[in-house]
Image: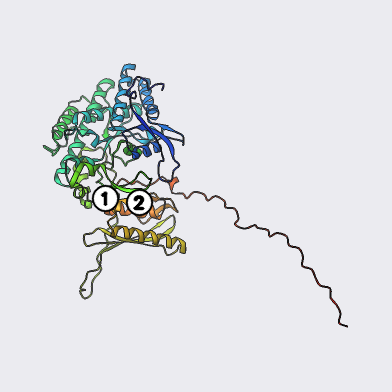
Amino acid sequence: MAGITGTLWDGVALRRERAGADPDSPLRPVALPAAWDGGAAEALAALAPGSGPVLLPRLAEGWIRRVTARGRRLGLLDSPEEADAMAEALRALLLARRGAPGAEVWRDRREEPRFVLNLPAFLEPGGGFDARAYAEAAALGVRVLDILGHGRAPRLRLGFADLAGLLAAFRIPYGGAEAQAVAAAVAALTRGAAEAESGRLAARHGALHPVALIWPEPPAATAVPGLAAAARAALDEAAASPGLRHLGCVALAPADAVEALLGAETAGLAPASGPLRPARDENGRYALRPTRAALRAGPEAALLLAPPPPEARAAMEAAVLPFLDAAPPGPLAMPAAPQAPRRAPPRPVASAAARTWRVAIGGMRLALRATEDDRGGLREIAFSLPREGAASRALHEAVAQAVSLGLAHGVPLDAFVEAFAYAPGAGGMVEGDPGIRRATSVLDWAFRRLALDYLGRGDLPDPAEEETRAPAAAPQPPLLPLDLPAQPAPRRRPFRHAA
């Protein structure tokens, strides 16, 4: 293949399968490294425009060539050799599933670019974290984003994904003091490596901004060996720069198909969604399989990956915020918990707690009621659509009953979230929920709301406006002929007068 021969793509064994961007999309042929999973195939199908065959080397070389060619044209890469070295470094980073630019770069869209690093991909075989390779990857991401911004962008969007997967590998519960120290150190290492590279670019092309005079203090030690020392060294290197090319470099963002392509299971700081995930088996049927984080956590997976309380996510944000150049994107705002009703005489058995949300989606009014068990977990749900037709009400009642029955028999909520989030239907703007602005259907809004409240998931962004419009219904032929066939006129008997 032209442009690929003689590069790292040589010798990469590819497998071919048919995959769609989502369960409702038509399948298309994709080719990707043999060791990558089916989720990567679906992500690859989502990243490639059109509906034809997708070959990972060809698709990746498209944006790699755009980056290096623009760098040479702008004078940000001094020689063809430097451009070739950057291209080979980007191929290596992608093949190791360690990092890549966001979907907007793969699709060549005129949007603000981002670059994401997959934290668990930097785990070492012996159980450590390759902080040096991570710092080098962060520096590479800064160079790519600087080129994509034509060397003039004041702020870059370099981020990381799947902190929950990294914590699981070291058996660290999400949200505790140890987890907060690791998160802060990762953010400090990212910022230090990024700003150190911004300083090196300033030395080559001229400084545009001064170095920060006040530096946040990174953790002195973490449960991840060498991480705290690497973060301190990166910040010290950045502080020694004569100036910077950028006002800010580090910003977390909601996940897109690139995270799935890299194998990251959560976005940014988001906690794990549980130890199991729905996946297709050999016969094409859905079954619950352990997540990658669960496989790393081993026997402690159920405990380590249990949904944390909402305050755990807030504590993680507070720990990393001093090292970010923009506030993290999630979780979104949640409705206040309902107040317990005043009780009359005490009852022998306490009634189950419940929460109710009332919203309008595309002008359709509805209510969602969630009943909780004695530990605050979701037990059952119910819909109320007072102004809808009997068929629509019956359908949503059936879904609610099926979900409630599944919850009672141990099916995790995240399995239902994966099944119903972004489900098509009658969607539109959401009124009454400040955390979700658009939804593709009632089920989409309901299960993304439940994911926010009961799973702490902030990795389910609002769909695009065009995705909330119901597809136009195809005209249906009449079930019966509109014109009845001609019938012979009945024969009239002659009228006879009585004699």
Q: Position of residue 124 (x, y in %)?
A: 19, 32
Count of numbered labels shown in the rendering: 2
Mark 2 neighbour class, 10 Å CA radius: few under 14, some 14 to 19, many 20 or more:
many
Residue 166: horizontal and vertical position, in percent? 21, 39
Alpha carbon distance from label 1 to label 2 = 14 Å
Using the rendered view, name the quadrant where residue 246 is placed: top left
Q: Secondary structure under badge 2?
A: loop
Determine if residue 369 is in view: no
Picture quarter containing residue 155? Answer: top left
350 versus 60 height, above or below? below
Q: Where residue 238 sits: x, y (%)?
A: 19, 28
- Circle 2 sits on which residue? 436
Tell me which label, 1 or 2, sits earlier in the chain.
Answer: 2
- In which quadrant will I find the C terminus? bottom right
Kind of residue at disc 1:
Gly
User: Given the current orientation, which residue lies at the most extreme front position?
Assistant: 283
Instruction: Indicate left or right for 2 with 493 as reference.
Output: left
Instruction: Tell me what residue is drawn at x 20 percent, y 73 percent.
Output: 348
Q: Position of residue 281 (x, y in %)?
A: 34, 45
Is residue 31 shown above or below 314?
above
- In this picture the colour scheme is rainbow
Quadrant of residue 53 within the rendered picture: top left
Q: Mark 1 points at which residue?
A: 456
Is the N terminus in the top left, top right, bottom left or bottom right quadrant? top left
Residue 207 visible, this angle: yes
